[in-house]
Image (spheres, rainbow, N blue to C red):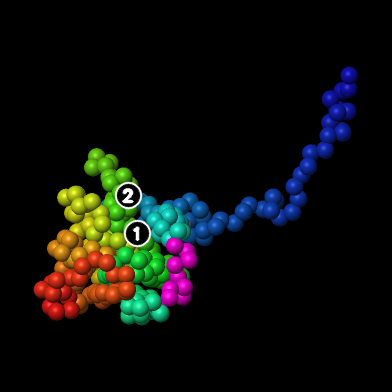
Amino acid sequence: MKRIGDVMQHISIPIARGPVASEPKAPDCAICQDAGFVRGDFPVGHPKFGSIFPCECRVRERAERQREQLSSLTNLDAFQDKTLDRFDPTVPGVVKAYQEALDFVESPTRWLFLHGGCGVGKTHLAAGIAIEVFRREPRWTVIFQVVPDLLDHLRATFDPSAGSGYDDRFNAFRNANLLVLDDLGTENTTPWAREKLYQLFNHRYNQRLATVVTSNQDLRHIEERVRSRLLDRELTRYIEIDADDFRTPHLPRQISPRRR
Ligand SMILES: [Zn+2]
């Protein structure tokens, strides 16, 4: 049997050498030394004396996390090929809508309402706008959403007793820098869905947040409060796409926005 001293002589313990191991790592954040919070600079007796606040590094981190979560809401994965430069503007009846889409991405500050039948390229243009704006404004929250799916999302997370997930999601839709809503008017119009859609439209209307909407529905079937915002000519560019396969009946003249 070996004595412990003999054994020890033959064991070499690797020792890491170099500056990494021998010097303490410099903190990532020079403001809070990675503590994540800072103390407010208030005098004794001030109600906020001694209180702590999240450091700007944490605020930044949180915003970044929220952005990552939101990018899962962007919903453009299935539409990656629907870019504006792959849109064929030579199809009869679509050139005006295409031009409007190009104008919109130059200055995404208003509303664009693309109205027309199935198969006229509305979804392609709407997705193309979302992709292009997201490419140009990488810090923006851009959400592309088919309206019936939007309401399904909201319903799935809606829980009146503990509604924070729902609120976050609804607020994401309400406040996105650009919200693209495809296929308005095909959702099941329960009173709840109507109210949610109205709240969404009304908030974005009041805040003048860039919004693109497509619909193939007769405008009479879109709820009046939503329709009146959609057809406000101060804010919205309304484009009727008259491609060959236009199938739904035209808007009756008395509520046509062209004739108001
Ligand atoms: Zn910090």
In the image, residue 130 lies at what x, y percent?
Answer: 39, 67
Q: Nearer the viewer, residue 31 or 165?
A: 165
Q: Which residue is mark 2?
A: 153
Q: Nearer the viewer, residue 120 or 103?
A: 120
Query: Would you say the residues marked 2 and 1 are in contact, meaning their CB atoms lie under 8 Å apart?
Result: yes
Q: Which residues are magenta?
A: 79-89
Q: Nearer the viewer, residue 48 or 189?
A: 189
Q: Is residue 188 visible?
A: yes
Q: Is residue 106 magenta?
A: no
- Is label 2 within 8 A of ligand 1 (CB to nearest ligand atom)? no
Question: Is the C terminus in the top left, top right, bottom left or bottom right quadrant?
Answer: bottom left
Label 1 crowd (10 A; few <14 / some 14-19 / many >=20)? many
Amino acid type of the residue tagged 2 in the rendering: His
Q: Residue at point 18% right, 79% down?
A: 258
On screen, residue 21 versus residue 186, left or right, reads right
Give the alpha-carbon distance from disc 2 to disc 1, as whole Å. Answer: 10 Å
Q: Residue at point 45% right, 59% down?
A: 78
In the image, residue 177 lies at what x, y percent?
Answer: 34, 66
- Is label 1 within 8 A of ligand 1 (CB to nearest ligand atom)? no
Label 2 crowd (10 A; few <14 / some 14-19 / many >=20)? some
Q: Residue at point 24% right, 66% down?
A: 248
Res 232 → quadrant: bottom left
On screen, residue 202 versus residue 104, left or right, reads left
Q: Which residue is mark 1?
A: 145
Describe the element under mark 1 as helix, strand or loop: strand
On screen, residue 8 versus residue 225, left or right, reads right
Describe the element under mark 2 as helix, strand or loop: helix
Q: Is residue 166 visible?
A: no
Amino acid type of the residue tagged 1 in the rendering: Gln
